[in-house]
Image (cartoon, rainbow, N blue to C red):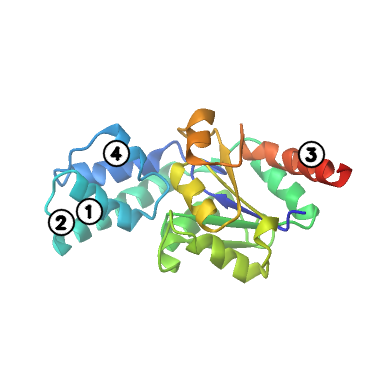
Amino acid sequence: MTELAVFDMAGTTIDERDEVYRVLREATEREGADYSDEVFQKWMGTEKHWAIENLLRLGGVEVTEEVHERAWQWFRAELRETYTQNPPRPLPGIEEALSTLRERGIKVGLTTGFSREIADLILSTMGWEQGRIFDVSVTGDEVPAGRPAPDMINTVMETVGVTDRAAVVSVGDTSADVESALSAEVTAVGVLTGHLSREDFAAEGAHFVLDSVADLPAALAEQETAVVAK
C-alpha cells in the first residue's frame, strides 16, 4: 500500500509555462555558453545552481566563481520578476488529485530543483499551504545534493516518518526525476506534462507513465486492487 507520494513541482504539478527553462538557458547563454537542445534537456529538473555551473562549462565558458555567481544572481532575479508578474498555476486536476491522496491517508511531498526562496514564492502565489495541499516540501538548496541524487526524496521520507521504500512513489516529468527515484529505490512514475514521451520514460527506466498527476489516484487504486486480488 502506498504511504507517500513525492512530486516534482514545475512541469509535474505546476504550470509555469516553461519560464524556468527559458531563464536558465538565458542565464548561461548571456555569459557566452553555447550548447545543443539535447545537452540542455539533460539538466532539466536538476538543482539550478549546479545546473548553471555545468551548462556554462559544457557551453565552453571558463567557469570562475565570479562568472558562476553572476549567472546565478541574474537567474534568481529574473525568475522572481517573471513569477511575480505572471504567477505559476496548478496544472489541471492536480489540486483535486493531491486532496484525494491525502484523504486516503497518503502523505504528499513536494521536491524541486528551485531554491527555497523561489519555491516559497511559487507556493504562496498559488495559495498552496503546507498541511492543506501538501505535507512537506524540500528544495534543492536544502540537501547535500539535488536531483538526480536521491537526497530530496530521502529527506521527505525522513520528515514524514515513512521508512518502507516499497510504499513510496516519486512522480516527475524529467529524466532527473526518474533517476532520483531509482536511486532512492522507490517507484518511479513519469508524467507527460513536460517534454518527455512514453518511450523516453521507458528508456530511463520509469516503472510506469501517466498522462498527468491527475491520473495518479486512480492508477494507485487500480494497482492496489490488483495486488489484493492476487
Locate residue 124 relative to residue 149 in the image: left or right. Answer: right
Q: Nearer the viewer, residue 152 or 202?
A: 202
Question: What's the residue at 60%, 42% (across, down)?
Answer: 207
Using the numbered discs, state the Cα–Cα distance from disc 3 to disc 2 in whole angstroms.
Answer: 50 Å
Mark 3 closeness class: few <14, some 14–19, many ≥20 residues within 10 Å: few
Q: Label 4 belongs to which residue?
A: 39
Query: Element under label 1?
Result: helix
**Is the residue marked by circle 4 packed among few (<14), some (14-19), or many (20+) residues within 10 Å?**
few
Question: What residue is drawn where x is 36% and y is 42%?
Answer: 42
Q: Earlier in the sequence, mark 1 or mark 3?
A: 1
Q: Nearest to the eye among marks 3 and 2: give it.
A: 3
**Residue 68's x, y, as percent?**
20, 58
Task: Tell which circle, 1 or 4, labels the residue nearer the N-terminal end.
Answer: 4
Q: Earlier in the sequence, mark 3 or mark 2?
A: 2
Looking at the image, is mark 1 or mark 4 nearer the viewer? 4
Q: CA distance from mark 1 to mark 3?
A: 46 Å
Q: Secondary structure at mark 3?
A: helix
In this view, the mark in front (2 or 4) = 4
Q: Position of residue 228 (x, y in %)?
A: 86, 46
User: Mark 3 = which residue?
Assistant: 222
Q: Amino acid at mark 3?
A: Glu
Would residue 145 appear left or right of 120 to someone viewing this image? Answer: left
> Where in the figure is residue 114, as x and y percent of width and height?
42, 55
Separation (CA) of disc 1 from disc 4: 18 Å
- Residue at the image point whose x is 17% and y is 64% from the top: 65
Amino acid type at circle 4 is Val
